[in-house]
Image (cartoon, rainbow, N blue to C red):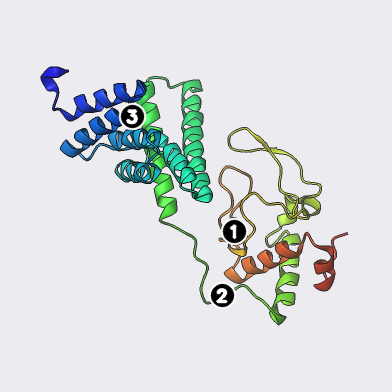
Amino acid sequence: MRAHAGHPDTLLLLGVIELQSGRAAQAAGSFGRSLHINPSQPIAQALLGDALMDLNRPEEALEGYDRGLRLSPDLVPAHFGRGNALLDLGRPLEALASYVTHLSMRGQVEYNVMKDLLSADRGADLMERVNGHLEAIARWWKEAEASIIRPDPNVLLPTGDKRTESVRNGFRLFRDQSAAGCIGCHKDYGRESTYFYDAWGTIGRPTDLTLGVYRGGRRPIDFFWRIHSGVNGSNMPLFSNVLSTKDIWDLVNFVQILPYPKMRQQFGVEID
């Protein structure tokens, strides 16, 4: 190691040893010197973030994680470290998003690798499979972040006097099997939904929409996104190919009033 003391890889390895030995300050110095020589090292950026977290410097740690992820979006541990830094900075919602990204990417990779191992073709090296899946999943996440669903700005969520007509049309679309037909899965508006297996083999059940408890947010735009594009991995299909933007907003208006008996009565919606 002494013969190559100034090499970025040597400094990186030294930093790892120091970090594992509880010497965070020395580790941060070694990672910093390695990155000064070669800043295009995503792992070194993330490890610097780890060292800075141990030194109670979350703001600088977050910068390190973000630099690492810009260089390599498939650096799964950096998403976890980023969540820790955001949590320490008092930004819990952003931290939650980072944790979800970490767990989702890790879970999908593990699932895909297990499928590979159980398949007939076992010729490829295991690490090649892992890296291949990581690259593909990271690419999907980046593409998704760059493809935010933006409703037609000329078609707004109906409010005021127009809301009654909107809710009633959403009610019709929900029940009409030739339209959205949501009631086919959300039987009795979710009160009698049947169980199913999702894409990962986990038991799921369509949401009981009369309870007003949701797993993907309760804002109008949250409902719009789920109806528009579905929920990947679950049995929730997309409806952007069969419903107009106006019809999706009408469904949103209906789903929003569904849990509240007085509002159903106000808008002339009878479900019992």
Left or right, residue 130 beside residue 30: right
Check disc 3 and report its element: helix, strand or loop.
Answer: helix
- The image shows residue 210 at horizontal and vertical percentages of 78, 55
Q: Which residue is mark 3?
A: 24
State the image coordinates of residue 139 (x, y, percent, origin top left): 38, 44
- The kind of residue on which mark 3 rests is Ala
Identify the residue at horizontal 43%, vertical 22% (top origin). 121
The N terminus: image quadrant: top left
Task: Assign a secondary structure to mark 2.
Answer: loop
Q: Quadrant of residue 5?
A: top left
x and y, in percent, of residue 78 in the image: 39, 38
> Relative to residue 264, is residue 206 depicted above or below?
above
| Rendered location of residue 61, percent (x, y) | 36, 41
Dot in front, 2 or 1: 1
Instruction: Name above or below for residue 266 compared with residue 114.
Output: below
Q: Is residue 224 left or right of residue 44?
A: right
Residue type indicated by callout 1: Asp
Q: Nearer the viewer, mark 3 or mark 2?
A: 3
Residue 259 or 177: which is nearer the viewer? Answer: 259
In contact (CB < 8 Å): disc 3 and disc 1: no
Q: Is residue 124 visible?
A: no
Query: Which disc number belongs to residue 155?
Result: 2
Distance between mark 3 and mark 2 Cα atoms: 55 Å
What is the distance, in whole Å, between disc 2 and disc 1 at their CAs? 16 Å
Q: Residues within 10 Å of mark 3 (few under 14, many from 20)?
A: many
Closer to the camera, 88 or 92?
88
Q: Residue furthest bottom?
A: 161
